[in-house]
Amino acid sequence: MNGFGPLKAIFFDMDGVIYDSMGNHAIGWSKAFAHLGWDFPCEKVYLNEGRTGSSTINLLYQEKLDRNATDMEIAAIYGKKTEIFDSMEKPKPLPGIAALMTRAKQEGIEIWVVTGSGQELLLDDLCSDFPGLIVKGKIISGKDVTHCKPHPEPYLTALERSKFKAGEVLVIENAPLGIQAAKAAGIYTIAINTGILADEILWQAGADVVVKEVAQVEDLIFPA
Ligand code: MG
């Protein structure tokens, strides 16, 4: 396989790639919207993963009320979702992800995180959970961009800040909108299907390759 030149950096998505956190997000969103009497099933959470909180809330408001949510409505629902998310057991890192980052670092490859998330609990813990691997200056979060995934802005922002060209990096994603964003930024994209969606949905989003677990990613990037 190829499609990226000498590899200078890996851009990691966070939820469903670094942390096994999507189950908690799905519960958080479903319960938060249930307060309004609105159904937001699990599969829909996974299909829309990668959006910022406000984008997810506006999606539902447009569907239900044909308008965007007000700032107050967004704050109320996102606050509720965050409260539910934070009350659950903290998501664990995905098996093998620290080993992959360690290998990348050994090979002189930079580690960046590109996430739509604004969940402070996880963002704050990235550096302490992955000491010496993830540093604050190499995290692009939902607060750093105007347009969230599937718009390419998050990944274009990572290219701009890292000063690498699209052909020098690769993206590891798990969600269709994240894959679309990375491909729209012109970056080779490995999808790990850690969630409940069919592989076909990740291929259709434009993934260059779809695998089941992190160990397979390591084999692809660093063939024996
Ligand atoms: Mg993700």
Image (cartoon, helix red, strand yellow):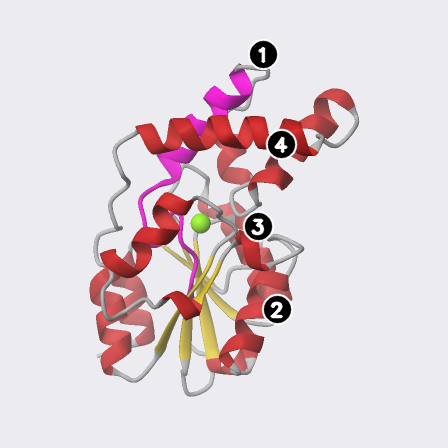
Q: Nearer the viewer, mark 1 or mark 2?
A: 1
Q: Can you give x and y, in whole percent of width and height, for residue 151 in the image?
A: 65, 57
- For label 4, being within 8 Å of ligand 1 is answered no
Q: Nearer the viewer, mark 1 or mark 4?
A: 4
Q: Secondary structure at mark 4?
A: helix
Residue 74 disc label: 4
Q: Can you give x and y, in whole percent of width and height, for residue 67 in the image?
A: 78, 29
Residue 207 disc label: none
Q: Quadrant of the C terminus?
A: bottom left
Q: How many marks?
A: 4
Residue named by callout 3: 177
The Cα atoms of the two marked residues, 2 and 3, are separated by 12 Å
Residue 37 disc label: 1
In this view, the residue farthest toward the front is: 72
Amino acid identity at mark 3: Leu
Q: Earlier in the sequence, mark 3 or mark 1?
A: 1
Residue at 39% x, 49% y: name it: 193
Q: Can you give x and y, in whole percent of width and height, for residue 163 in the image?
A: 53, 83
Q: Nearer the viewer, residue 36 or 169?
A: 36
Q: Quadrant of the N terminus?
A: bottom left
Residue at 76% x, 21% y: name it: 65
Q: Nearer the viewer, mark 2 or mark 4?
A: 4
* 201 in the magenta segment: no
Q: Earlier in the sequence, mark 1 or mark 4?
A: 1
Q: Earlier in the sequence, mark 2 or mark 4?
A: 4
- For label 2, being within 8 Å of ligand 1 is answered no
Q: Secondary structure at mark 1?
A: loop
